[in-house]
């Protein structure tokens, strides 16, 4: 199996970090942020991330993704 690529941090823009890495399919660029506030504070929200990626070699632009630190109820 292929190993995950180490991303290079390009910059920080307020709450958003910009990153890139080289994948087997080409360069991947993305911006990433985490919540600045979680309500209610007494609830364990886990780690949460929101990012938007671009993969020019695959003709993918501005693909949003959300990763929650918990399972959603169905």
Image (tube, helix red, strand yellow):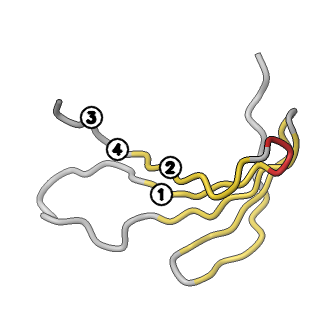
Classify residue 47 as left or right of residue 58: left
Real-space Cα separation, disc 2 to disc 4, in angstroms: 13 Å
Residue 71, numbered label: 3
Give the alpha-carbon distance from disc 4 to disc 1, as whole Å.
11 Å
What is the quadrant of residue 73 in the picture? Answer: top left
Is the residue under label 2 in contact with that under label 1 (CB below 8 Å)? yes
**On the image, numbered disc 4 is attached to which residue?**
69
Q: Residues within 10 Å of mark 2 (few under 14, many from 20)?
A: few
| For discs 4 and 1, the disc positioned in front in the rendered view | 1
Label 3 – label 2 distance at C-alpha: 15 Å
| Sooner in the amino-acid sequence: mark 3 or mark 2 | 2
Of pointers 4 and 1, the one earlier in the residue sequence:
1
So how many labels did they put on this image? 4
Q: CA distance from mark 3 to mark 1?
A: 16 Å
| Residue 1 or residue 25, whichever sits in front | 25
The residue positioned 51% from the left and 77% from the top of the image is 15
Neighbor class of circle 1 (other Cα within 10 Å; few <14, some 14-19, many 20+) is some
Q: Which quarter shows the N terminus?
A: top right
Q: CA distance from mark 3 to mark 4?
A: 7 Å
- Pointer 3 and pointer 4: residues touching (CB < 8 Å)? no
- Measured Cα–Cα span from mark 1 to mark 2: 6 Å
**Residue indicated by mark 2:** 65
- In front of the other: label 3 or label 2? 2
- Please tell me the numbered disc located at residue 50: 1
- Of all residues, the one furthest to the front in this rendering is 59
| Secondary structure of the residue carrying numbered label 1 | strand
Q: Secondary structure at mark 2?
A: strand
């Amino acid at each position: 199996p292929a190993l995950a690529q180490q991303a290079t941090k390009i910059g920080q823009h307020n709450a958003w970090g910009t990153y890139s890495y080289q994948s087997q399919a080409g360069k991947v660029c993305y911006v990433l942020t985490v919540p600045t506030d979680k309500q209610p504070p007494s609830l364990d929200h886990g780690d949460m991330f929101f990012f938007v990626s671009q993969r020019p070699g695959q003709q993918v632009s501005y693909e949003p993704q959300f990763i929650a630190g918990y399972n959603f109820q169905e």
